[in-house]
C-alpha cells in the first residue's frame, strides 16, 4: 500500500440530488436542495455533490447557480461529457467536476465511466476543465484498467463505483470489496487521489472508509432517505462518526 505520507484524512461529500427529486415530484420550491446543502455544511460535511443531468430530472440550473453563490464548502459538479455541461462548468467554475456516464432511461447512475474505451471522446473535456482550474475526477469501476486510463487522460482524481459492493449479498460482498481494495491500492501507486461512492449505507460504509488510500466518500440517496426518519443533520453526523471510527480503527491496527 504505497502511501508514504500515511493515511489521508477522510472527507465526506453529501450528494443533494434526491432532495431535488422530492421537490420536483410535486413542483414548487420545497424541499429546497440548497437549504439541504447548508444543513449538510452545518452538520460537518466537507463538500456538496450535485449532478446536473441532461433532462434536469432533479438538480436544476438555478440550483447550481445558488450553490455556487451560497456554499462555503467545495461543490463537486457531476456532469456528463457533453458540450452543454462543459459550458455550464466553465461558466460557474465549481471546485471539482466529476465526469459520469449518463443514460436517459436509467433511474440512477448504473455503473462507471468507460475511461479506457472513451479516451478520444473524454480527452478534450478533461483538458478544458483542467485548463480552467477545475479539479477533474472520473467516476469509474474499481478496475485497474480504468485507473490507468485516468492517468493517460490527465485526470488527477478517480471515484470508485461502490454500487456492486453495496448491492451484493454477503456471500459475494467480500469479493466486491476486494475489487475496491485492489483498485484503491493501484490508484495510490499511480499517484491518483482516490474517492468512492454510490449506494453506501450505515451498514456498508466502514470497510470502504477503513482503506487508507481513499480520501473522500460521496454519499447522497441513503442520507436523504434517513433524513425522513431522523433528520438530515442526524444522518450526516452518524455517517461521519462511522467513517471516522472505521478509519481510526484501521490506522490503529496498522500501527499495532
Image: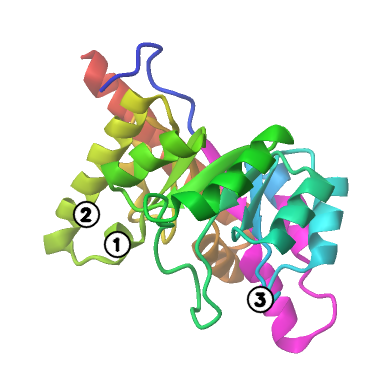
Q: Earlier in the sequence, mark 1 or mark 3?
A: 3
Residue drawn 16% across and 52% down? 174
Q: Does residue 247 appear left or right of residue 95 in this picture?
A: left
Between marks 1 and 3, how big is the CA–CA gap? 23 Å
* Relative vertical location of residue 10 with respect to residue 105 in this rendering, above or below: above
Q: Mark 2 — residue?
A: 176
- Depth check, front residue: 230 or 124: 124
CB within 8 Å, label 2 to label 1: yes
Residue 22 among those drawn in magenta? yes
Name the front one of labels 1 and 3.
1
Q: What are the residue bounds of the magenta stretch?
A: 11-39
Give how far across and how far down residue 66 sits, in percent.
86, 55
Name the secondary structure under disc 1.
helix
Residue drawn 65% across and 35% down? 130
Residue extending farthest front: 120
Which numbered disc covers residue 164? 1
Q: Residues within 10 Å of mark 1 (few under 14, many from 20)?
A: some
Between marks 2 and 1, how big is the CA–CA gap? 7 Å
* Relative vertical location of residue 138 with respect to residue 29 in this rendering, above or below: above
Residue drawn 77% across and 50% down? 38
Quarter of the image for the C terminus: give it: top left
Which numbered disc covers residue 21? 3
Give how far across and how far down residue 165 sits, in percent.
28, 58
Q: Residues within 10 Å of mark 2 (few under 14, many from 20)?
A: many
Give how far across and how far down residue 89 sits, in percent.
74, 50
Q: Residues within 10 Å of mark 3 (few under 14, many from 20)?
A: some
Q: Earlier in the sequence, mark 2 or mark 3?
A: 3
Between marks 2 and 3, how big is the CA–CA gap? 29 Å
The image quarter containing residue 47 is top right
Name the secondary structure under disc 2.
helix
Residue 168 among those drawn in magenta? no
Amino acid at each position: 500500500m504505497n502511501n508514504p505520507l500515511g493515511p489521508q484524512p477522510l472527507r465526506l461529500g453529501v450528494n443533494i440530488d434526491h432532495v431535488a427529486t422530492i421537490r420536483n415530484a410535486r413542483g414548487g420550491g420545497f424541499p429546497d436542495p440548497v437549504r439541504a446543502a447548508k444543513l449538510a455544511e452545518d452538520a460537518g460535511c466537507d463538500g456538496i455533490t450535485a449532478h446536473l443531468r441532461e433532462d434536469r430530472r432533479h438538480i436544476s440550473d438555478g440550483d447550481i447557480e445558488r450553490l455556487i453563490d451560497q456554499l462555503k464548502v467545495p461543490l463537486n459538479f457531476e456532469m456528463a461529457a457533453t458540450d452543454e455541461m462543459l459550458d455550464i462548468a466553465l461558466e460557474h467554475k465549481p471546485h471539482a467536476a466529476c465526469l459520469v456516464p449518463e443514460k436517459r432511461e436509467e433511474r440512477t447512475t448504473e455503473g462507471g465511466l468507460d475511461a479506457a474505451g472513451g479516451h478520444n471522446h473524454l480527452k478534450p473535456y478533461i483538458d478544458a476543465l483542467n485548463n480552467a482550474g477545475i479539479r477533474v475526477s472520473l467516476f469509474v469501476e474499481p478496475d485497474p484498467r480504468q485507473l490507468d486510463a485516468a492517468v493517460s487522460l490527465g485526470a488527477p482524481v478517480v471515484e470508485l463505483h461502490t454500487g456492486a459492493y453495496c448491492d451484493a449479498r454477503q456471500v459475494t460482498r467480500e469479493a466486491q470489496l476486494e475489487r475496491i481494495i485492489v483498485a484503491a491500492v493501484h490508484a495510490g501507486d499511480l499517484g491518483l487521489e482516490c474517492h468512492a461512492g454510490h449506494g453506501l449505507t450505515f451498514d456498508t460504509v466502514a470497510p470502504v472508509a477503513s482503506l487508507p488510500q481513499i480520501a473522500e466518500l460521496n454519499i447522497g440517496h441513503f442520507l436523504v432517505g434517513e433524513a425522513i426518519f431522523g433528520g438530515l443533520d442526524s444522518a450526516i453526523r452518524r455517517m461521519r462518526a462511522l467513517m471516522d471510527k472505521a478509519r481510526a480503527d484501521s490506522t490503529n491496527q496498522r500501527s499495532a
